[in-house]
Amino acid sequence: MDPKLEFLHDVKSCQGIIHQICMAYELDMEARKDLYQEILYQLWKSYPTFRRESKFSTWLYRVALNTAITYYGKNRKLSEHEMHVEDIPDRNERRSEEHQRIDEMYKAINKLGKIDKALILLFLEDKKYEEMAEILGITISNVGVRLLRARKKLEMMI
């Protein structure tokens, strides 16, 4: 199969992962679109180095999370003009209760630290601790401890 077509097929099959990462790291719709494009660019640029030693989704998570963390750090320096998560108005008052809860969850996830965000996203994708450790480059026991702490923080926020 042509490498370009293979890349497009692989990315399309994992598109939801990219959207989920973008939602967790960027609340602003325009910034989220920019982050999505940056992740796609980094995936394309890194694709020749994908050795197929792990699942494509595992590799994609690693590239996408690293891109989001780097992008977030570069573009989200707090300034006096930046809105805080609590200040973001509800875009549509008539949203269903479920959508409101999902928005609240992502707002809470957005308040977590870089690694905790990534762990929660991987947890929501039902990834095993071993795969989380591989994606994030931490030990399996560290995954367990940090995930427990992150979940407790989220419970207190929601």
Image: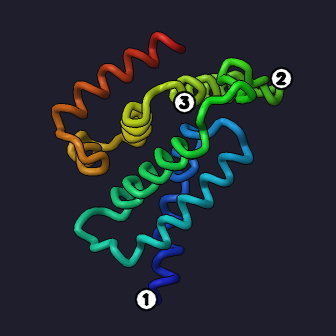
Dot 2: what SS? loop
Q: Residue at x 65, y 47 (%)?
A: 32
The answer for how far apart the CA atoms under marks 2 and 1 are is 47 Å
Dot 1: what SS? loop
The tag on residue 110 is 3
Q: Is residue 20 visible?
A: no
Q: Earlier in the sequence, mark 3 or mark 1?
A: 1
The kind of residue tagged 2 is: Glu
Q: Residue at x 41, y 33 (%)?
A: 120
Residues marked 3 and 1 touching at CB (< 8 Å): no
Out of 35 and 145, give the one closest to the viewer: 35
- Residue 13 image offset from top left, x and y in percent: 49, 63
Residue behind mark 2: 93
The kind of residue tagged 1 is: Met
The answer for how far apart the CA atoms under marks 3 and 1 are is 39 Å
The kind of residue tagged 3 is: Asn
The tag on residue 1 is 1
Q: Is residue 142 visible?
A: yes
